[in-house]
Image: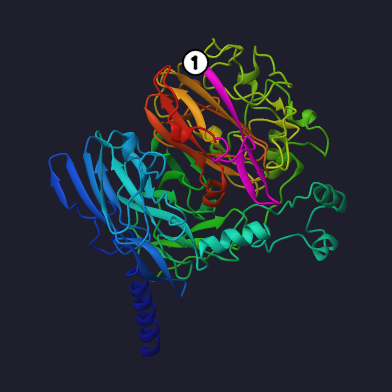
Amino acid sequence: MDRRTFIRSSAALGLLAGMQSLAPAWARSTPTNPIRSPALEPTRRAGRLVEYDLTIDRTPLTFGGKTGRAVTINGTVPGPLLRFTEGDEAIIRVHNRLHEDTSIHWHGILLPNAMDGVPGVNFPGIKARSTFEYRFPIQQYGTYWYHSHSAFQEQLGHYGPLVIDPAGGDPYTYDREYVVVLSDWTFEDPHDVLDNLKNRPNYYNFQRQTLFGLLRGEDMRLQDRLAWSRMRMDPTDISDITGATYTYLMNGQAPDPGWFGRFQPGERVHLRFINASAGTFYDVRIPGLPLTVVQASGQHIEPVVVDEFRIGIAETYDVIVEPKDQAYTVFAESMDRSGYARGTLAPRPGMTAPVPSRRKRPLLTMMDMGMAHGGSGMDHAMMKQGEVPVHHGSRNHGAMEKRARDASSDTTAAMHGHSMHDPHAGHGMTGMADMPGAAPTRLRPPGTLPEPVPHGSDGHGPANAMAPDVTRSRLHEPGVGLEDVPHRVLVYTDLRALHPEPRRAPDREIELHLTGNMERYMWSINGKTYAEDPLIPMTLGERLRLTMVNDTMMNHPMHLHGMWMELENGHGERIPRVHTVIVKPAERLSVLIEVDALGPWAFHCHVLYHMELGMFRVAMVQPPGASIPDRFVSR
């Protein structure tokens, strides 16, 4: 190596070391790191009692060469990794050094209601310059995260990873582990971001269709454009907030040079992916490296080999990879293709791999609006029975084959022996007799997929801009922008619990419509905000089917606090447990809930700006016959 090459290489390594020093310890890779991601050292450990101290403050941090003031946890974004073992007792003291209230919600963790961390719902919040002590038993295993539930602090960096090792060990082996936290950062004040969206909802959308695109044949046909124009909607509205303001982060690092993780050739590497974004869905792939998905929402599943997966806001996926003696790019592309987060897996520092070119931005279709060919949608949504559902993760598929299979139904099990819902039924509680508490009627077997259903006459008022002709299960679809890729993409029908469990039939069903008006940037449930209709009443001990119907053109990652949702994806006793699930446009999706935790629990869309504007409810779990607390009564 000549002197010039040595100096250039030394400078590059020095830059890499400097960038890594900005990240928390668990996000760095050095030869002395343990196989598992290093967690924050507990303040005290006594038997199964594990204590941590976390400090919330504002700290200047640099993202992509520009400095902003972040809300940090122990001085970093993301915050420190907290690690427990199933069966531990957690004590976490949160010291708030901010001049405002704060909070921490333990996302996906089952715990006592008072420890859930949602101000105004189950605790008053952590006052400025004060300390709050969380204490709860660790009753589960898996990959989770924690974040603020106070205003826009989550957008400002207030989040971190949490890993719980199973008491009996994992059912799969690996040699090295990394936690990979995906997020988004803006140097704008989040309140200004919201104001911009309220004033002009497409403020951050610089990917709208143009006349030039029409003439070149790159965008949709003129007649389709005119149809969207008549609906006063834009098929490029994939994400509210884009790379126009967002810097996309992987473990707190901007894409250039990005996060670095080291491995030894021949190792099996366990990657724990967490989407801690405020507004970004990511499509994750490692070109040249198959991904074996082994956990979803922190729960073990039957391994599925794929090449790419979409991770919605607040979701977690664990994958195992077996890299060779070369560098690989960990590529997390935003769903709207306006940017990406990036990392590198390599056996030696300084190695890099090519960064994939960004794909063409996707367009919504009339199917995303619950229509087919601009018509009623029934000819497409009421598809042929008796055909096998698509299983994207299990095999390669070409674009043409995929389109053909997507035109077939995966609702056979759901529809067999069951009549269609009444198209004239309302959208409150369905499948119920008229009398409150009466036995359910016409409820399909647990674990089966929802039937396609024509939308009823209730348009949910001015807060809702559209109502699909037909809503149907879309769990077998990879999602907008991934329909025509030539490789394996994870879909929700791929997810099967590792072990079968008997699934008790639901006692009743609640149907909720996810509603919005993009033109006015309004978000709600059943056309009403949280202030207008705050509660979903639930009774302790009941078995509930919650059916979510997306009346909007946006994807909504819906999260229930305090209880598992069992995703009815057609796998009977092997349906998976999830804490967060993406509901696609014009989709009808159902989950089963064992209502076993007293108290008020938040239920909301995890797009932060949607939640703040009203796509939020409180699932109020009470003993039979109890009255609603005054603070939750609609005014």
What residue is shown with label 1? 505
Q: Residue at x 57, y 56 (%)?
A: 334
Mark 1 Cα shell of 10 Å, populated few (<14), some (14-19), many (≥20) = some
Q: Bounds of the magenta span?
A: 505-533
Amino acid identity at mark 1? Ala
| x then y, percent, for residue 564 | 42, 31
Q: Is residue 144 magenta?
A: no
Q: Quadrant of the image for the C terminus? A: top right
Q: Residue at x 64, y 15 (%)?
A: 416
Q: Residue at x 14, y 50 (%)?
A: 44
Q: Residue furthest left?
A: 46
Residue 367 at least partly seen: yes
| x then y, percent, for residue 40 | 24, 55
Tally of numbered tags: 1
Q: Residue furthest right?
A: 223
Picture layout, residue 562 above or below residue 270: above
Q: Under tag 1, what secondary structure?
A: loop
Picture layout, residue 207 above or below residue 385: below
Q: Which one is nearer the viewer's eye here, 35 or 424?
A: 424
| x then y, percent, for residue 99 | 35, 62
Q: Is residue 248 left or right of residue 479?
A: left
Q: Residue at x 71, y 18 (%)?
A: 422
Q: Which one is nearer the viewer's eye here, 632 or 267?
A: 632
Picture layout, residue 160 above or below residue 382: below
